[in-house]
Amino acid sequence: QKEVEQNSGPLSVPEGAIASLNCTYSDRGSQSFFWYRQYSGKSPELIMFIYSNGDKEDGRFTAQLNKASQYVSLLIRDSQPSDSATYLCAVKAGSARQLTFGSGTQLTVLP
Amino acid sequence: ETGVTQSPTHLIKTRGQQVTLRCSSQSGHNTVSWYQQALGQGPQFIFQYYREEENGRGNFPPRFSGLQFPNYSSELNVNALELDDSALYLCASSLTEMNTEAFFGQGTRLTVV
């Protein structure tokens, strides 16, 4: 079982719709959760982080964390073609030095 | 722009050669982590440097080594290159060694032929 799992996609949504990206993790000691956006050929860009159960909103992005169920999700409202990218979920256990990444979900927003 | 810069951006090396990749961390950040990202995969942790000492290491062989300098910039060295070392190498800097929010440089694309 992978430590951090994401659906690889591709996930396609029409422009203006809500895109929902999901991530599950296996280490119950995980305490910090991150979403990175990676355009093709570029490096990952941090777009959201969440540490506590519940929702965290930042503009069109909402991160949701449920530690009991060991999942974290990212909602993108009013999706734009410029949101088309691979979204990486990353998890950090409390004492760990590293981020553990999923393989990413490829999102395509259709005009 | 994250303020993290890596050089070179692209590199082609021959199997068996050695390579050095460089990273300048964001101002005020004393911790640098290196990751390897193969095509279609998420980044894999190589190691972290904090105050010039290796501060954690992933599942990579000893031919992957690094340095951090007093100005917190860092190098990744890979000896005896193998074809499977072809990947995007990412440097991430963070404010502290507990690596809360980590910001990546633009990466170095290494191709081993």
Image (cartoon, rainbow, N blue to C red):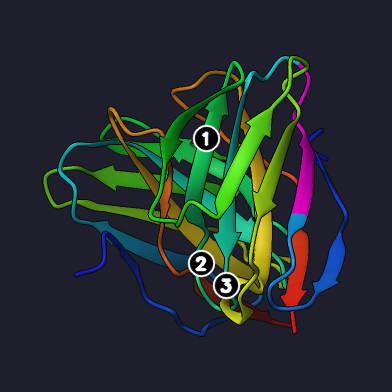
Residue B24 included in the magenta stretch of the image: yes
Of the two numbered discs 1 and 2 in the rendering, the one whose residue sits closer to the viewer: 1
- Dot 1 or dot 3, earlier in sequence: 3
**Considering the image in quadrants, where does the C terminus of chain A appear?**
bottom right
Looking at this view, is A83 or A70 the one in front?
A: A70
Looking at this view, is B76 or A40 the one in front?
A: B76
The spot of residue B30 in percent (x, y) is: 64, 18
* Quarter of the rendering containing residue B78: bottom right
Of the two numbered discs 3 and 2 in the rendering, the one whose residue sits closer to the viewer: 3
- Name the dominant secondary structure of the magenta segment: strand
For the residues labelled 3 and 2, the Cα–Cα distance comes to 29 Å
* Disc marking residue B38: 3
Q: Specify the amino acid type for callout 2.
A: Ile
Q: Specify the amino acid type for callout 1.
A: Gln
For the residues labelled 1 and 2, the Cα–Cα distance comes to 37 Å
Direction from residue B66 to residue A8 in the image, left or right? left
Q: Is mark 1 in CB contact (under 8 Å) with mark 3?
A: no
The spot of residue B111 in percent (x, y) is: 75, 76
Q: Secondary structure at mark 2?
A: loop
Chain of the residue that carries numbered disc 1 in the rendered image:
B
**Residue that label 2 marks:** A18
- How many C-alpha atoms fall within 10 Å of the one at disc 2: few (<14), some, or many (≥20)? some
Looking at this view, is B68 or A39 the one in front?
A: B68
- How many C-alpha atoms fall within 10 Å of the one at disc 1: few (<14), some, or many (≥20)? many
Looking at this view, is A17 or B51 the one in front?
A: B51
The answer as to whether the residues below labels 3 and 2 share one chain is: no
The spot of residue B13 in percent (x, y) is: 80, 73
Q: Which residues are magenta?
A: B20-27
Q: Specify the amino acid type for callout 3.
A: Ala
Q: Secondary structure at mark 3?
A: loop
Direction from residue B68 to residue B53 in the image, left or right? left
For the residues labelled 1 and 3, the Cα–Cα distance comes to 19 Å
